[in-house]
Image (tube, coloured by chain):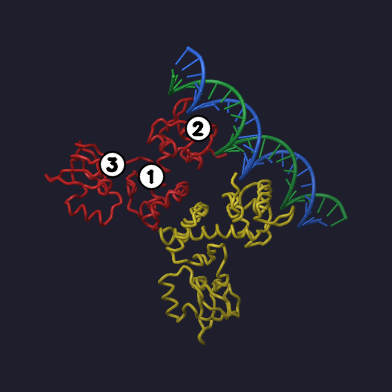
Chain colours: A red, B yellow, C green, D blue
Amino acid sequence: MLSRDLLMATITEENYLKAIFHLSQKTDQVSISDLSKSLEVSKPTVNSMVKNLKAHGYISYEKYKPIALTKVGLKVAALILRKHRLTEMYLVEKMGFGWEEVHEIAEQVEHIESPAFFDRMDELMGYPTVDPHGSPIPDKKGEFLSQNKKKLNDCGIGSEVIITALRMSSKGLLEFLDSRGIALGSRLKILSKSTFDNSVMISYEGKKESLSDKVSERLLVEEVS
Amino acid sequence: MLSRDLLMATITEENYLKAIFHLSQKTDQVSISDLSKSLEVSKPTVNSMVKNLKAHGYISYEKYKPIALTKVGLKVAALILRKHRLTEMYLVEKMGFGWEEVHEIAEQVEHIESPAFFDRMDELMGYPTVDPHGSPIPDKKGEFLSQNKKKLNDCGIGSEVIITALRMSSKGLLEFLDSRGIALGSRLKILSKSTFDNSVMISYEGKKESLSDKVSERLLVEEVS
DNA sequence: CTAATAAGTTAGATTGATCTAACAATGTTT
DNA sequence: AAACATTGTTAGATCAATCTAACTTATTAG
């Protein structure tokens, strides 16, 4: 058999790596049981696949210990994620699908091997760096750029931030921001957050203003203090 | 295991059915060896898969006899073909790929299970019935409509035809046809064909005219006599 | 019509991904 | 610390898709 490229995993392997990635986002301690539940396969199946993934250098693993992606494994996962998120955005923006419909299709499309196909989607959408859920889209090399982009309403009270991007940008959102004198590059300080309606009280340019969660979750920011 | 839908084949099965379909277009007598060559797998592999396809009702087969698709098998093949051809057209028309590049991508996309995905492509392109190679695109039910659409230069000398569609339609082609007074619905008679440059001599509305193969292979016609 | 060649089949092995049953290690609770 | 529950592992089987080696049936060329 022709020896496989390090970055070329089977579809099954890709799905395991993706699951490990997603689980480690939440818990950081990924176990065989977690994978078994999330992938809906038996624990012995996971056990043997985990050995396989280790042998291929995608994960580090020792008996009874938690599972973690290696650099290579992370890169493979990131590249699948890139394909998944580009596909979802493309389906919504260019083909008119609703956000509920696109996940299932993207789960299949993400396994297609054709850099050109995904690069073209990327190009047609103007190289987005975050998807409309605010999740970053890794670049062609599998790097998560814009790690400094988080939603405004995920930042702590007292922090000062600069708006670096918008997600789910729309004419309505732009008009709203414009009416308040807020734009890309604006520097804001978070004064308080309401637990009742999730609105955020901010100050900028000496003014005080309340932003609803509908707005604040669309503002992607870099924390500067 | 949950019993599989009759029309739901594995990707491998789909590829065998597709190969059988294509081979039977040319030779009508599809053999194990033909499949072995075209799919680049060994003859024993084909042998066992052929048994499997027979067991699932996709093909008819008896030892040492030729292979033929059943109605169900033909439908499955047609539905894959539909997905393949819609994908190719979409990649060219909506994503700006060249015709050389799209086959490989379509080979992968054709296995995606999502009627909505392909129906949307279909819709965005205005429900084409032939692809730019002049090959028919089966409908959602796997039926080949427009069997009466063939290229003008594939019709016999003396036959009378009506232009029913254009393939690889372009401004240039439309302007050319307009300048000769030819349009959809025009009735032509084929007087002769040159074996030297593949041009076609036709008569219509009392006029005599020679059409280059570049033009005649883009005219899809229905033979009326 | 035989003999050579091509085509098809059978048998048995392999690989990837899965399962169940049984057993072992780890962690938790009183 | 002992008992129980959870988690992980081993062993062994299955299934789809593939292979090679060896054998059989068909076809074709003298």
Q: Is residue A73 above or below residue B26?
A: above
Label 2 packing within 10 angstroms: few (<14), some (14-19), many (20+): many
Front-most of A171 and B42?
A171
Q: Nearer the viewer, mark 1 or mark 2?
A: 2
In the rendering, at what x and y percent does residue B224 appear? 58, 79
Q: Secondary structure at mark 2?
A: helix
N-terminal of the pair, mark 1 or mark 2, is 2
Q: Quadrant of residue B31?
A: bottom right
Q: Are marks 2 and 3 in contact (CB under 8 Å)?
A: no
Q: Secondary structure at mark 3?
A: strand
Q: Label 3: chain?
A: A
Q: Is residue A24 left or right of residue B22?
A: left
Label 1 amino acid? Lys
Does mark 3 fall on the same chain as mark 1? yes
Q: Distance between the Cα atoms at labels 1 and 3?
A: 21 Å
Q: Is residue B37 left or right of residue A187?
A: right
N-terminal of the pair, mark 1 or mark 3, is 1
Label 2 amino acid? Val
Q: Mark 1 highlights which residue?
A: A140
Q: Secondary structure at mark 1?
A: loop
Q: Is residue A206 above or below residue B57?
A: above
Q: Quadrant of the C terminus of chain A?
A: top left
In the rendering, at what x and y percent does residue D8 appear? 50, 27
Q: Mark 3 highlights which residue?
A: A150
Does mark 3 fall on the same chain as mark 2? yes
Q: Label 2: chain?
A: A
In the rendering, at what x and y percent does residue B139 appear? 53, 64
Q: Are marks 1 and 3 in contact (CB under 8 Å)?
A: no
Q: Is residue B103 left or right of residue B225?
A: left
Q: Mark 2 highlights which residue?
A: A50
N-terminal of the pair, mark 2 or mark 3, is 2
Q: Distance between the Cα atoms at labels 2 and 3?
A: 32 Å
